[in-house]
Amino acid sequence: MAKSYVKFEVSKEVAEKALDAVRLAKQSGTVRKGVNEVTKSVERGLASLVVIAEDIDPEEVVIHLPKLCEQRKIAFVYVPAKEGLGKAIGMSVPCTSVAIEKAGEAEAAIKDVISKVSGKVQAHAAEGSGKSEKKAEETKQAKESKSK
């Protein structure tokens, strides 16, 4: 079963490209690893791309990241495993999430990943806003019927 924080599917090709971007940024740029550091990076507007693992348990640890990225208009992408994300940044332990702050040589790879996931993020955001508009309309109708 998919985790509730995973908002869209990412192909293996895009996930690999994201991990490559993380590797390059680690070597020549600046990355922040772990949920706390990634959250700070996004809140401060420093992140250019956030990479989140799909297999986090409990999912409450990272459930806030996609919404925060959407609010700050920062691109995010999912990768299948936290072990792969940890290896991509040179750690011997799994990693939940990574924020790329300064791209370095990963600039082209980051732009490619963003271009491939931006349509999915926008589609999800439009779907979500449609649901909230529908819910607002239902609430309004319920209040009107109670007042009559």
Image: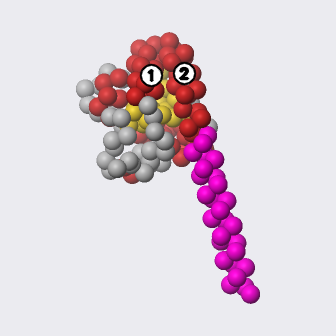
Q: Compared to 5, does 139 lie above or below?
A: below
Using the image as rendered, state which of residue 88 and residue 139 is in the foreground: 139
Using the image as rendered, state which of residue 114 and residue 119 is in the foreground: 119
- Residue located farthest toward the bottom when viewing the structure as drawn: 148
Indicate the amino acid at tag 1.
Answer: Lys
Numbered-mark total? 2
Which callout, 1 or 2, points at the residue further toward the start of the chain? 1
Task: Examine the rendering and report whether any part of residue 53 can be seen.
Answer: yes
**Which residues lie in the magenta part?**
122-148
Indicate the amino acid at tag 2.
Answer: Asp
Q: Residues within 10 Å of mark 2 (few under 14, many from 20)?
A: some
Residue at screen point 63% across, 47% down: 126
Asked whether, in this view, residue 56 is left or right of residue 14, the answer is left
Using the image as rendered, state which of residue 148 and residue 12 is in the foreground: 12
Q: Compared to 20, does 86 lie above or below?
A: below
Secondary element type, mark 2: helix
Principal SS element in the magenta part? helix
Mark linked to residue 17: 1
Q: Which residue is mark 2?
A: 112
Please state the horizontal and vertical placement of residue 58, each as a whole percent of the image: 32, 50
